[in-house]
Image (cartoon, grey):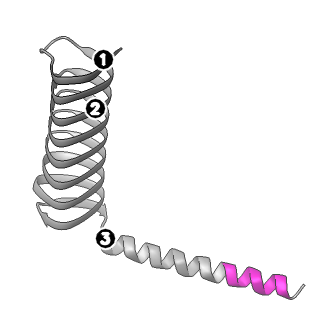
Amino acid sequence: MENISSQPELSQSENSHTTYESINADQVNVTDSAIKRVTSQQIHASECGIGMVNSGTASITNSALGAINSQEISVKDSGMIVSASQISTINDSKVGLLFGREIHGSKISSVITIAGKIDAPVETVVEQRSLILVGIAAGVAFGVVTSLFRYLNKNR
């Protein structure tokens, strides 16, 4: 496994099946690689498995990501566990937790989506309203149980 740090640019050719522990570069262009952590101003990844991405802009195609934190994300035919960005353009992809100021694209599947503006068909398992209701119900249940325990301990 390689660690690459403080390089202005990393470009890796196709068919090299490379594994990286960590990449820290201004620009990253990778194909068919496994990477634990990427920190960059700009990343272009295709057919990769990446644990964590922290970047200014990210363009991801046919890849799997654990978590991504970026100002602007463009994702196509990929899967992500957690995605947080200001502007997301997601096409034909699946996301566990999707957070963003603006979400654009097509055919997005998500477990939980929280966004200021959504301009895309997003199929969610849990939407914002349901999440708020679950939070309120949990708070009320916690309050009732706590009050009940206080009442029972007071009478002993």
Q: Is residue 151 above or below residue 142?
A: below
**Tag 2, which secondary structure?**
strand
Q: Quadrant of residue 30?
A: top left
**Tag 1, which secondary structure?**
strand
What are the residue bounds of the magenta stretch?
146-154
Q: Position of residue 62 (x, y in %)?
A: 16, 33
Q: Is residue 116 magenta?
A: no
Give the residue drawn at x 53%, y 77%. 139
N-terminal of the pair, mark 1 or mark 3, is: 1
Q: Quadrant of residue 59?
A: top left
The image quadrant where one finds the N terminus is: top left
Give the residue drawn at x 18%, y 45%. 93
Give the residue drawn at x 27%, y 58%. 99
* Disc marking residue 38: 2
Q: Quadrant of residue 98?
A: bottom left
Mark pair 1, 3: CA separation: 38 Å
Q: Main secondary structure of the magenta part?
A: helix
**Which of 83/24 is in front?**
24
